[in-house]
Every structure is written in structure tokens, then in C-alpha cells.
Amino acid sequence: NSIYGIVELNKSRELDMLLSEISQSQTAAGSHREVIGLVEDDPDYKLVLQANEMSTRIAGEILVVHRFLLDRYKRRFPELETLVRNPVDYARTIKAIGGAKDIAKTELNGILPNATQMVVTVTGSTTAGHPLSEEELIRIEEAADCLLDLSRTKHKIMGFIESRMPFIAPNMTAVIGAATAAKLIVEAGGLTALSKIPGCNIQVLGKAQHTAVGLSSLTTKKHAGIVYYSEAVRKIPEEFRDKMVRKISAKCALAARVDAQHESSDGVFGQKFKADLDAQMEKLLEAAPMNAIKPLPVPDEGPKKRRGGRKVRRAKESHTVTELQKQRDRLQFGKFQDEVVVMDEMEGAGMMGHAAGRVRATQMNNRAKAKVAKKYEKYMKTPKSVVAGTASLAFTPVQGFELANPQADDTHKNKKVKTAHDRYFASSTPFM
């Protein structure tokens, strides 16, 4: 039941050797020094990778100890688990409360915020927990001390990583931070190996770390690796995180190639990449421009140009309502109108065929008639000295063109009729 039977790293030989090497490196390191040759051969680089791996293992151990404390102390104060979420704050609160019967008298200043202190005090006075034995309190206090020691060790290791990463990978540190840069280098297998990975694959590095912890895959974020859970991305609004992860991963790929070639040891390229990312982030977060309300144009109060002439009048006449259409639209009072079927639809005939009077003839527009030029008018006039007569022009297949006087034909025809009448009906003709 002891915490030291569960935790492996606390006070282990491996952790003590690493801490001693870190102390020696910090003592020997002075000012900035230039890395010559492959960065993987530098002793500080190897130590940084070991320290980063150890910090990851310590973070896992802290979660195990926190789970141990929750299981043991919930019998005394079960509501404390939901009030204090942070493992370090939870351990400090347990050490402060201990086995006190009146939690309201416990001093929590410097451990929890004032608002949280008030909630813990009020909830502790009405808790449904039971007192713990002395043996259980000793084991819980040992576990809390172990968690705090692991937290201090991790903080020391992370401080060493952050102090050495600007020398090993200054441009990557400027883009994404020392801790995240170290995690990416460890996951890729070295800075040279990381420089050969494209940006689209850098964004999924470390994905297995978050999908193999026993959680449901339905709630697991796709394509979310070390970069997605870094501080540079977590401070971005959630709706823009996926887009910024792709952009940050692409900049990390460029920065890793610069660092692998030992160029820009002062991190100028990384600072430039970081400024570009900040500008793109500001562009995404800025509000959409408002649509300016444009005033209506000044109305043209002058006379409008209207086309006139024969063509326009003829076009208007083709669209005018005829008398027949007017009769169709009229209804006679007290009488039913005739109905006809047009294209499967029933339409009324109105007063068509029942209107009194007659349909008005189409009005002729004399101005639209063709006019004869003045020089040809003299040829169309009949001379006054010539008596107007009639003539007939006939065409026969035997004689061809024949010009005849119709009045002469009528005289001859009348004469023949009179001769025939005199022959039979004259007073001097005897009875036959």
C-alpha cells in the first residue's frame, strides 16, 4: 500500500545520475558557444534528449501518484477531487488539511486562490467524509511528498531544457518553444531526422502518445500530435487551431532545416517565422469588414430622351389592344358569358359576338402612307384637254396583245339584241 512500491523514478539511481549531469552541465556552461559538426554529436544535445525523455516519464508518474491520492483521500473529503483539479495543488491541499476535524480552520493561503479557498472551506464543513486512521494519513502524506518532489524535479529538468535548446535549435525554439521543440526532436529521432520530415508529417508526430492511454477513439482529435497540444496552439481559439497547426508545422520544418545546417545561430530566421505566424493569426482573428451603406444616386430630373418616328409608332400599334380584345374583357350585366377551352383551360368570351353596333374599322394613319415625290406628281395628273375614256387590254394565245374599246363592244352587242327583238317582236313582223 506504500507509494514507493508503485513509483519507480522517485529517488531512483537513473534520475539521480541525470540530475548530477544536469548540474555539471549548468556549472560548466558559460556564455553562448557555437555547435560544430553534427548536432547529434554534441554532449549537451544528448543530455537534452535524455532530460526531455525523463520529463515525459516523470509526468506519467505524477498522474499515477495523483490517482493514488484520489483513491485514498476521497473517504475523508470526496468533494475535494472536483474542487481542485491540479495534481500539485491537490497534494498541497491534502498536506494542509491532513486529518483536521474542522476544515474551516485550516490555513490555505498561498496554496489555492481566494475563491477556491472559500468553496473548499464551505464544502468541507458539510462533507460526508469519515475520519482516517493515523496509518492511512501517513501513507497519504508520503504520497503527497512524493508528488511534490517529482514536480520539483520536472521543473528543474524543464528549466535545463529551455536553457539549452536556444543553443541546439535556436530557430525551432523561437517558433514553437523550447519544450515542444525538444519533444519533436526526441520523437523524430534527432534534429537531422526531423529536418528530413515534411511539415504535413510533423503535425502528427506524437499522435500515438494521446491515442494509447485507454481513452475512447471517438473523442480523440484526429491529426493531433505534439504540435496541437503545445502552448503555441492551445492559446488559439478552437475554430482556428487546425489551420494554425498546419502553418506552425510548416514553419517548424523550415526552422529544423536551418538548425540542422547550423545557420542563423542567433535565431533570426525563427523570429521571422514567428512574426509571420503572428501576422497570420491576427488576420484570422480580425473582424469581418462591415459593408458600407452606399447612398442612392441623385435622380436625373431632366427630360428623358424618348424615341419617336414611324418605326416607333408601328411598334406601338402592334401592341395596342384591339376592339375584339376589349369586348372579351367586358361583361354584360345580367347575362352569362360564353366560355371556350383554350389549351386545356377555360376562358370567358365576354361580350364577343353580343356587342351592339359594329366593330370600328382600323384607323388609318395618313402620315404613315407612302408619299410620291413632287417631280413625279405631274405624270400622275390627267390632262384637262383629253376626254377620259376607258380601254381594255387583253392577251390571247392566237392574236397576242389586243387593244379594244369596251364601249364599242357594248354598242355592237346592243345592236344585235335589238335586231333579234325586231325580228320576233316588232309590230310589222307577221305572226308565224
Image (tube, rainbow, N blue to C red):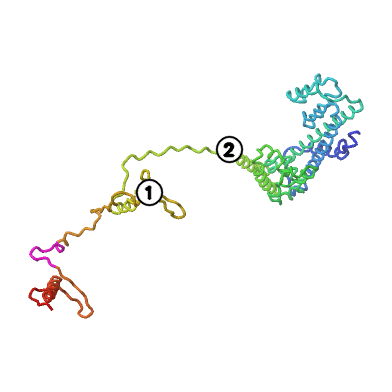
Q: Nearer the viewer, residue 314 or 224?
A: 314
Label ID, residue 350: 1
| Quadrant in the picture for residue 176 | top right
Give the residue type at disc 2: Glu
Q: Secondary structure at mark 2?
A: loop
Residue 354 appears left or right of 245: left
Q: Nearer the viewer, residue 42 or 432?
A: 432
The residue indicated by pointer 2 is: 286
Q: Dot 1: few (<14), some (14–19), or many (≥20) neighbours within 10 Å?
A: many
Residue 143 appears left or right of 296: right
Q: Residue furthest top?
A: 105
Residue 282 appears left or right of 38: left
Q: Quadrant of the N terminus?
A: top right
Residue 353 appears left or right of 113: left
The image position of residue 111, as x and y in percent, is: 78, 25
**Residue drawn at (77%, 32%) of the image:** 86
Q: Is residue 47 visible?
A: no
Please, what is the dominant secondary structure of the magenta stretch? loop
Q: Secondary structure at mark 1?
A: loop
Q: Which residues are magenta?
A: 378-389
Image: 111 above or below 318: above
Image: 56 above or below 126: below
